[in-house]
Image (spheres, rainbow, N blue to C red):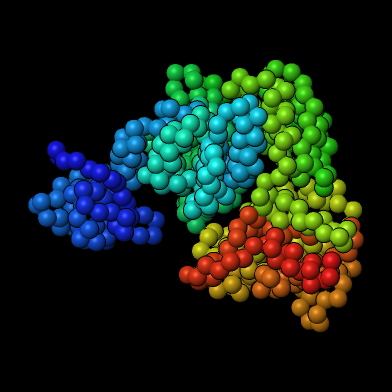
């Protein structure tokens, strides 16, 4: 055990002499299968859960009950427990995490802090930015990023926390100053056993990863029934926020439209007016959560207000695509039934023209939500264009057929005969598997005053086809479709 270890790895391709390799039992791959590769690279220490993989006597083997959790502890120790030198905010929930993280970042920057963000879109701090490989990084990568942030003078970190990360123990040795629960609706049931299992994973942020001793504050959306359960179970410091009822943070009035959201909000420290260019009635909920975090850090209301109003947009979250046709074209990441419903209800509440929705569902993910999303789109759109998303290893047509079940049950007519020249008088849908063609079709049919919602991929700049990744950006494809119309 008296050995010097110069680096840690859980990927056998990234280990070399004097390294420690941890064999992780993953959801799809077992790292024990790569022990031989790690040994060939000259590792000195192997951390395993299993004994049935031979290791030479010259190599130290450490057997643990859970190698992924062991890696979390090893990584924190190796990097000098960087979380202890940072003020941390964790955000969990099915929808709203990214927008809330951007709002909190803007507030903290307005207050003069150096802020790092780890989330679904990017990992970024200072002038450094990298595309996120997953919402919450693997523990070794996470601790390394936190250590880099400390070295670069970051003081506060805002982190989107996924249910996968909580379930897999990636956050061991990390305690948050504040934790936010946004909401919970159907998602990730390809990984979790059921909604209760999904919920229990989320609750770990509040039961295992908030600072103890009365320091960690839970910020909870109590409009959500799952949030109410967390509120009732929470014994330490907590604040609630709601749109529907009185709470510590709630709106006295809300005005939302296709140009943004505004209103007056009540907080424990006063009443404030707020105006934000973020589109969607539901964004007031995200604003309340961010405001609560700001006050949790003892910031002045005027500073919080300025920070919220400074955020112009969030990539792929009801992101407008400018055009000269008098259309409202929005690209949104909504890839769950509830997120799609919220987006469409916000549009329906204030849109004057017709609503055209382009969407698909990802492959190798929860298939049960596909007909549910079809039903939501069909109920709230004048024309639904069902297309491909990231099919991964599934047949895109199979996914589309499952989405169509929800549309057929409404029932709605399918317009797949003669090519559409205009939006039909009564609601219906069309199947257009090629996403580029689907976007172009919707834009060609839309008239002045109409709203086109392109949902599902949001900020993503790629499409996953089989095991191939190709460049694909809904915003770029929208601009190309507009150019084809000579506008």
Task: Decide if residue 71 is on the left or right side of residue 386.
Answer: left
Residue most extreme to the bottom: 418
* Number of marks in picture: 0
* Residue in the foreground of this view, choosing between 14 and 185: 14
Residue 164 visible in image: yes
Position of 442 relative to 246 (above/below): below
Position of 180 relative to 352 (above/below): above
Please state the horizontal and vertical placement of residue 403, each as a whole percent of the image.
65, 66
Position of 407 relative to 204 (above/below): below
* Residue in the foreground of this view, choosing between 431 and 445: 445
Residue most extreme to the left: 57
The residue at 72%/29% (across/down) is: 306
Please state the horizontal and vertical placement of residue 155, each as a whole percent of the image.
51, 29
Image-quadrant location for residue 30: bottom left
Image-quadrant location for residue 37: bottom left
The residue at 56%/68% (across/down) is: 470
* Residue in the foreground of this view, choosing between 63 and 125: 125
Please state the horizontal and vertical placement of residue 90, each as a whole percent of the image.
52, 35
Residue 46 visible in image: no
Task: Decide if residue 290 is on the left or right side of residue 122.
Answer: right
Task: Decide if residue 199 is on the left or right side of residue 295.
Answer: left
Q: Which quarter of the image is occupied by the C terminus?
A: bottom right
Q: Which quarter of the image is occupied by the N terminus?
A: top left
* Residue in the foreground of this view, choosing between 471 and 267: 471
Position of 218 relative to 457 (above/below): above
The residue at 14%/50% (across/down) is: 59
The residue at 80%/80% (across/down) is: 419
Please state the horizontal and vertical placement of residue 433, each as a whole percent of the image.
66, 73
């Amino acid at each position: 055990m008296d050995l010097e270890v110069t680096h840690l790895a859980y990927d056998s391709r990234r280990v070399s002499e004097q390294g420690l390799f941890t064999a992780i039992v993953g959801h799809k791959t077992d790292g024990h299968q790569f022990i031989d590769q790690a040994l060939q690279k000259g590792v000195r220490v192997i951390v395993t859960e299993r004994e049935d993989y031979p290791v030479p006597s010259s190599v130290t083997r450490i057997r643990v009950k859970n190698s992924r959790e062991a890696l979390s502890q090893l990584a924190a120790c190796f990097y000098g427990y960087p979380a202890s030198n940072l003020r941390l905010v964790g955000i969990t929930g099915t929808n709203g995490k990214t927008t809330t993280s951007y709002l909190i970042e803007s507030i903290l920057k307005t207050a003069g802090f150096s802020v790092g963000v780890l989330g679904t879109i990017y990992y970024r701090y200072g002038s450094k930015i990298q595309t996120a490989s997953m919402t919450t990084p693997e523990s070794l990568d996470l601790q390394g990023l936190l250590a880099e942030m400390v070295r670069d003078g970051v003081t506060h970190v805002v982190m989107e926390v996924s249910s996968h990360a909580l379930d897999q123990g990636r956050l061991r040795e990390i305690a948050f100053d504040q934790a936010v629960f946004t909401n919970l609706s159907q998602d990730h049931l390809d990984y979790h056993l059921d909604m209760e299992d999904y919920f229990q994973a989320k609750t770990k942020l509040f039961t295992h990863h908030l600072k103890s001793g009365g320091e960690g504050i839970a910020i909870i959306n109590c409009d959500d029934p799952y949030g109410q359960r967390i509120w009732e179970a929470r014994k330490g410091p907590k604040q609630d926020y709601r749109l529907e009822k009185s709470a510590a943070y709630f709106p006295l009035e809300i005005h939302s439209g296709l140009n943004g959201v505004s209103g007056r909000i009540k907080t424990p420290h006063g009443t404030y007016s707020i105006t934000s260019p973020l589109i969607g009635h539901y964004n007031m909920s995200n604003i309340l959560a961010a405001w609560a975090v700001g006050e949790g850090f003892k910031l002045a209301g005027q500073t919080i207000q300025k920070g919220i109003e400074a955020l112009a947009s969030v990539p792929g979250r009801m992101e407008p695509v400018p055009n000269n046709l008098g259309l409202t074209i929005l690209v949104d990441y909504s890839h769950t039934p509830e997120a799609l419903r919220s987006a469409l209800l916000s549009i329906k509440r204030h849109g004057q023209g017709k609503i055209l929705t382009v969407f698909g569902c990802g492959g190798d993910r929860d298939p049960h939500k596909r007909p549910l999303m079809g039903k939501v789109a069909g109920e709230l759109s004048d024309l639904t264009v069902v297309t491909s998303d990231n099919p991964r290893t599934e047949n895109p047509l199979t996914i589309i057929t499952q989405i169509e079940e929800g549309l057929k049950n409404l029932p709605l007519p399918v317009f797949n005969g003669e090519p559409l020249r205009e939006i039909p008088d009564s609601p219906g849908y069309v199947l257009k598997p090629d996403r580029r063609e689907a976007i172009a079709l919707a834009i060609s049919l839309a008239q002045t005053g109409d709203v086109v919602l392109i949902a599902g991929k949001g900020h993503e700049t790629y499409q996953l086809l089989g095991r191939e990744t190709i460049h694909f950006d809904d915003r770029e494809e929208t601009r190309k479709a507009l150019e084809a119309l000579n506008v």
